[in-house]
Structures are given as structure tokens and as C-alpha cells.
Image (spheres, rainbow, N blue to C red):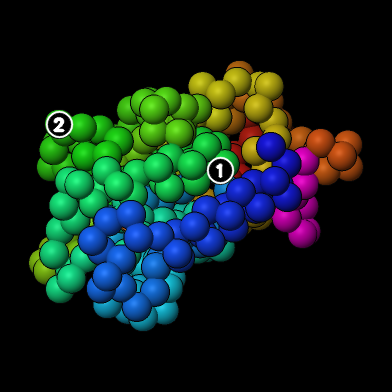
Amino acid sequence: MTETERQAALEGIAGEVAACTGCRLHAGRTRAVPGEGSASSEVVFVGEGPGEQEDRQGRPFVGASGQLLGDLIGSLGWGRPDVFITNVVKCRPPGNRDPEPDEIAACAPYLRRQLEALDPSVVVTVGKHSLNAFRPGERIGRVHGTTTPADPATGAGNALVFSMYHPAFALYQGSNRKTLFEDMTGLPGALVAARARRGPGDATRVAPAASVPTDALAGAPVTLPAAVAPVTPLASAGVIDRVPSPAPQAPEPGDQLTLF
Ligand code: URA
Ligand code: SF4
């Protein structure tokens, strides 16, 4: 899929979501929240569902949890526009209650289709409902900060799933902040591993420019595995237009990795 086709697919899904009456959550919503971000990103964050602010603005993670999620993304030298952010359910559960299983099931095709369009390298599950959608039966206390291959049935068949606590976990108890930031340092490594799994034929995955500070990698500079081909901007070849402006330097194997 080209960048333009990805964008069009995501916009089409967003239009369907805005008009959806597929479960009872449609009745209480102010605005549906389909998700937002870069259609060319390799990294997709999947939260639980919109809260009050999100419902008001029609955008994901714009309240207090969203502020912290933005800080977590920023700690890697990335920005929100570098990634795609969405939720398991696209409409706000009343009073921020947990989404019900039948609501999650009704909404699942939208998430699956978004992931099919995005074809991410890494899906980041944010919180327990998202974890449950991608790693059923797992507990967040056991798997936070770890990765596992995604089930192709999720729509993200070429991705690794990286799991994190929900930012609300730190808002309720400040001492959990450290865990969230520590877990986040594992995400660039997950992306490197995901690229290696996808193989050298997948050099089209160019994402926005920003470097990962070495300390975000817990002092261990990530070197590009030899198996991963240097990322080659393919826009000039007319293959894909995923090159940000200015175009990033293509890393050489052995270079410290510049993610995005
Ligand atoms: N919490 C979520 O899980 N998703 C949002 O979009 C906002 C808060
Ligand atoms: Fe439709 Fe999902 Fe909203 Fe339910 S939560 S009404 S399935 S978009």
C-alpha cells in the first residue's frame, strides 16, 4: 500500500466510525475518536477507549493520561505525530467505565482494519484491555515492557506487540511513573527486533526523523543488526512516499541507530 492509499484507508475508517451505531456506546458519545497520527509510522499505540476530554475533542489521549503518554513518547526523542494512536473502542464508555466485552467485539473490526492499513512494525498495547486484545490471558504485571509476535488475526501480522501499563497507572500512584518510563526504554529495541523480523525486503518503513537519546536506551547504544538493511528512501523510486522532510540519514550497519 502506498502512503496515499494508507491515508485514504484510514480516513475511510474514520468516517465509518463517526457514523457507527454498532454498539450501545454510540448513544452516549459527543464525538467518536477513531485515532490519529502518521499513516506512515511503524509504531501504533492502542489504548482502551476515549475519556471525557477525548469524547469532547474527538482525539485520542488528550486528557491527563494523554499528557503523560506524550511525555513517554517524548522521552524517546519521538513526538506524537511520529506515531499513530488509537483505542480498542472508539466511543467513550459512560463515566469512564471499562468497555464491555460485546462493545470491544463490536468495535474490533475498525482496529483490525486500521492495523491492516498501517501494517506497523510494533503495536504498543496501553493498559489491560488493549493487552487483552493482543495477548489474551496475559497479565500486565507480568508482561509490561516485553514483546511478543502479534497474532495475524489482529490485522498486524508483521508486528511485534510491546506492552505497557496505562498512564493512568502512574496518575493514580506517582511511584509508578518510574516503571512506565523504564518500560518505555525497551520500545526502540522492540522496533529494531521487529524490523529484523520483517527482513531486509522491508526497507520501505521510513518514519519521521528524530534521534533516540542514548540514555533512553539505558546506556546501551543500539547497533543496527546486519540483517536489517539500511533504510533507503524509496520516494525517489516512486515506490513509496514515507520520507519526512528533511530526509533522515540512512543508517549504516554498525552505526548507532537513529530511529525515525
Ligand atoms: N485513555 C485511553 O485509553 N485512551 C484515550 O484515548 C484516553 C485515555
Ligand atoms: Fe461503533 Fe465502536 Fe463506537 Fe461501538 S464503540 S458505536 S462499535 S465505533
Q: In this view, does 187 lie above or below 136?
A: below
For the N terminus, give its image quadrant: top right
Query: Residue 243, image x and y in percent?
Result: 75, 49
247 inside magenta stretch: yes
Could you say which quadrant of the image residue 25 lies in?
bottom left
In the rendered structure, does residue 173 fall within the stretch colored magenta? no
Q: Mark 1 points at which residue?
A: 118
Q: Can you identify the residue that label 2 sits on?
A: 137
Q: Is residue 248 visible?
A: no
Real-space Cα distance between discs 2 and 1? 26 Å
For the point 45% across and 64% down, the residue is: 19
Q: Which residue is drawn at 33% across and 28% down?
A: 148
Q: Where is residue 124 in the image (x, y as percent from the top left)?
A: 37, 45
User: Residue 98 location in percent, x, y?
Assistant: 15, 58
Q: Residues within 10 Å of mark 2 (few under 14, many from 20)?
A: few
Q: What stretch is highlighted in magenta?
A: 240-250
Which amino acid, mark 1? Leu
Q: Tell me which amino acid carries mark 2.
A: Gly
How crowded pointer 1 is (Cα within 10 Å; few <14, some 14-19, many 20+) is rated as: many
The front one of 71 and 121 is: 121
In this picture, residue 87 sits left or right of residue 239: left
Prevailing SS of the magenta stretch: loop
Identify the secondary structure beneath mark 2: loop
The earlier-in-sequence mark between 2 and 1 is 1
* Left or right of 5 in this view: 51: left
